[in-house]
Image (cartoon, coloured by chain):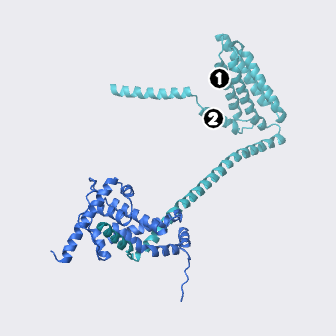
Amino acid sequence: MGRNKFEKQLKEQLQKREIKPSKAAWDRISQQLEDSGKAKSIPFRWYGIAAGFIGILFVAVLYFTRDETTSIPETEITNSKMDAVPVTTNPEMNEVEKAKANPVVVESQVQEEKSIPNTSKGNANKRMEDALASSKAEETKMEKVVVRFNTSEALIETKIAEVVAQVEQLETENSTVTDAEIDSLLRGAQRQILKDKIFRSDKSVDAMALLADVENEIDRSFRDQIFDALKDGFLKIRTAVADRNQ
Amino acid sequence: MKIIPFYKTEKQLIKKSASGNRDAQRRLYEKYAPKMLGVCRRYIKDLHFAEDVMVSGFVKVFKNLKAFRHEGSFEGWIRQIMVRESISHLRKNQFVVYDETVMEQAHPQTPMDSFDWDTEHIQSLIDSLPDGYRAVFVLHAIEGYKHQEIAEMLDISESTSKSQLFKARRVLQEKLKQQNRIGYGTE
């Protein structure tokens, strides 16, 4: 009982007890509340800045990619216009024909590539003729749109004749002609045609043909590259061995 | 001249404080700060540390004011936050609660009669207790928490809480004996 009375008295007196805090206490509370409020608002602000930045980036990317895509047709249009002018003024100039002749040859090549796996070796000549005939058909379609000129046609015709002769020669020599051989012959002929077109009759240079020629030189086959690398390696080893033996 | 209070009821004051109104928060603080500093001081001997704990307690009060549902008394809610804040301060400073055997049957033999000490004297008596004893004694004898609740708050077993209380009482009894002897001139 004594203990309970004692503790009850302690409790009463302590619960009544009040201590006045220092004046700085409220300022500290207020400061801490403001700091926590700022800490909350800062991430949102940063999110806003980040979102804005991403938005600007997105718009910039869109703008530039759009600019690129639109610029390509524009150049095509100007080319066609430039090409169209000589057609009307001077029928001797064959710029339009040349510009159009390139896709024809490429298309014929694609058709060749498609047809090669399906045919047997014995029918190589027939295939060649079919392929060339189909390329000719394409050419006739183009004729409806473009004015054709005898000079380039004659060039293509002579090349076709050359290729056919080469194939026949190969057939007589080896009795069989592989698809790869025909393919390489056609490609060679195509390159030759393009090369011949670089210099025009009026001694000017055809930009498109020149570009195609340069690209051909750049696009070396994988085999060539491997051979070159092997050659380099071999030469290095040879010099190293020679140096060591001295 | 009659002063008309801006906020008619405490509920309005709490509502305004919860919405971040600094003036309302200050009024609430001024009303409860002295009592709450008294609460913190019971657990923490140093007044400056006690005030630090009270400050962080009030920051928590204002941050979590929206969670107050007006179901119990507001003062009780703040007091609870202050007690928990004081305990966490003690725990941060690694106060030790020795897990010893229970001696709840052994009641103090010396009767603790009524006294006429002032509050400062009582506080100094409680301050003389080791941290662990003092926390359990104040929580149980002054705040009225049960041993189970104390065990949860201090992360100790219930039996430890009981033994700590017993020891705190015994120390207080010894102190009282000494005070009485000095008071009656027996020493």
The chain that appears cyan in the image is A
Indicate whether A241 appears above or below B3.
above
In the figure, is residue A201 to the left or right of B121? right
Name the secondary structure under disc 2: helix
Most foreground residue, A243 or B125: B125
User: Measured from the top left, where is residue B5 in percent x and y?
Assistant: 54, 80
Q: Residues within 10 Å of mark 2 (few under 14, many from 20)?
A: few
Residue A210 image-quadrant placement: top right
Q: Residues within 10 Å of mark 1 (few under 14, many from 20)?
A: few
Most foreground residue, B164 or B130: B164
Residue A184 image label: 1
Residue at mark 2: A215
Q: Residue furthest front?
A: A1
User: Measured from the top left, where is residue A134 in percent x and y?
Assistant: 78, 24
Indicate whether A193 appears above or below B86.
above
- Amino acid carrying mark 1 in the image: Ser
Picture colour for chain B: blue
User: Measured from the top left, where is residue B97 in percent x and y?
Assistant: 29, 57
- The answer for which chain carries disc 2 is A
- The answer for which chain carries disc 1 is A
Q: Which quadrant does the N terminus of chain A fall into? A: bottom left
Indicate whether A70 appears above or below A189.
below
- Amino acid carrying mark 2 in the image: Glu
Point 68% across, 49% down: residue = A67
Residue B12 image label: none
Point 84% across, 33% down: residue = A144
Q: Which quadrant does the C terminus of chain A fall into? A: top left
Q: Residue furthest left?
A: B187
In the figure, is residue A177 to the left or right of B19? right
Most foreground residue, A245 or A103: A103
